[in-house]
Image (cartoon, rainbow, N blue to C red):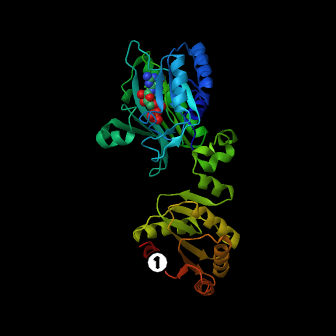
Amino acid sequence: MNLHEYQGKEMLASFGVRIQRGIVATTPAEAVAAAKKLTEETGTGWHVIKAQVHAGGRGKGGGVKLAKSLEQVEEIAGQIIGMNLVTPQTSAEGKKVHQVLIAEDVYYPGDNEPEEYYMSVLLNRSTGRNMIMYSTEGGMDIETVAEETPHLIFTEEINPATGLLPFQTRKIAFNLGLSGTAFKEMTKFVASLYKAYVSTDSSLFEINPVLKTSDDKIMAVDSKVSLDENALFRHKDLAALRDEREENAVEVEAKAVGLNYVDLDGNVGCMVNGAGLAMATMDLIKQAGGEPANFLDVGGTADAERVEIAFDLILKDPNVKAILVNIFGGIVRCDRVAQGIVDAYKNMGNIEVPIIVRLQGTNADIAKELIDNSGLDVQSAVEFQEAADKVQAVLA
Ligand code: GDP
Ligand code: MN
């Protein structure tokens, strides 16, 4: 689950991470009130107006703008709230902006030029350890930095037995070329950031940019926080921050009925039981030249009702041109699943795409007969490859 920038920043601040301060607003009037309040608290006269959507690259898409007066705050907030923000990380339709963050301008002039760094905290899956990834090249896509100047990306792995050690925070500050106050600030920043990451059971933090202000303060100007869904049960306060408007509508609906559904870009809908078989099915579809439209694990009880709910979810995606049902009947009998498919098909009455069904396991032969004699646009397959080939044939 992802947080909005403003939610991530508030969470980070609660762990002692210095942040660019801001107040969220849903109307231009609220934006002006927020700007006035920030001016009282921080003395800043300039503000940045930042679209709050779950996508990066907002600056490039016109979703981050500097306002030098209250009139400009009102005007820019009016432009950004309600707009469909298109960034390199959204679809072509973009994302509707429901709220903006009014933040203090932290790029004020001073003794030194402000400097931008990149920092993320994530799990290195090959070593099984958390790591901090950081770079002097902040403010731009880390993918570009990785491609063009990979030597400017550093990583620091954390031993879970000791946690992040002081020598490591100093090494990071040193590699970023800092000294004096900024060096000390950075060691504190990194330590608090890592504490926040571990304490919230997060799976990714990306702070781009981390800013060194002209007066040597180190702060988070942006925040991308992804929380581990499996740990949310012990973070009720964070779970409450979910913004379903930002999530895929079908995924939200699937979750509500206890189905594991992930939306993908292809045109072959998949209904499978078991995550492993679902992954294998998606691989096979790809090998046969197709593209899966979704991942869907219907779980152990594939009865008519559940099959109907699953068909319904799959068909909400207008790109779906065929459905592949691949179910292994271990505990659940194949003939029951087959009957479920036939019943659901008839009940729904609006299925217009061909369906290929592969049922293997207990009573698979009875199931095949049921499908073959149903008189519906449902084809049966016995072998895995045969199923994939039949999907390709109906798409051709
Ligand atoms: P992103 O484009 O979605 O990654 O959004 P960011 O929060 O990273 O903001 C984009 C860019 O806006 C940053 O890289 C900065 O260059 C700029 N920016 C952010 N805050 C300020 C600010 O307080 N003052 C000024 N002048 N620019 C800012
Ligand atoms: Mn950013």
In the displayed structure, does residue 74 sit left or right of residue 236?
left
Instruction: Identify which residue, 58 or 382, lies in the foreground.
Output: 58
Residue 6: name its quadrant. top right
> Residue 59: x and y, percent?
44, 33
How many numbered marks have been drawn onto this rendered protein structure?
1
Q: Is residue 294 above or below residue 171?
A: below
Ligand 1 occupies quarter: top left
Query: Which residue is painted at 57% across and 69% down in the image?
Result: 272
Tell me: residue 269, above or below residue 222. below
Residue 359 visible in rendering: yes
Q: To which residue does mark 1 refer?
A: 390
Residue 310 point in image, percent of width and height: 62, 65
Q: Amino acid at mark 1?
A: Lys
Q: Is residue 277 above or below residue 176?
A: below
The residue lying toward the viewer, choosing from 88 and 329, is: 88
Compared with residue 49, is residue 366 higher up or lower down, i.e. above or below? below
Q: Position of residue 209 (x, y in %)?
A: 44, 30
Q: Quadrant of the C terminus?
A: bottom left
Image quarter of residue 393:
bottom left
Q: Is residue 272 left or right of residue 384?
A: right
Direction left: furthest residue? 148
Where is residue 60 drawn, in percent x and y? 41, 35
Question: Do we see residue 167 in this rendering?
Answer: no
Task: Name the element at disc 1.
Answer: helix
Name the residue at 62% across, 24% down: 30
Within 8 Å of ligand 1, the CB of disc 1? no
Classed neighbour count for the residue bearing mark 1: other residues with Cα under 10 Å, few (<14), some (14–19), many (≥20): some
State the residue in front, 157 or 59.
59
Residue drawn where x is 34% and y is 39% of the image? 145
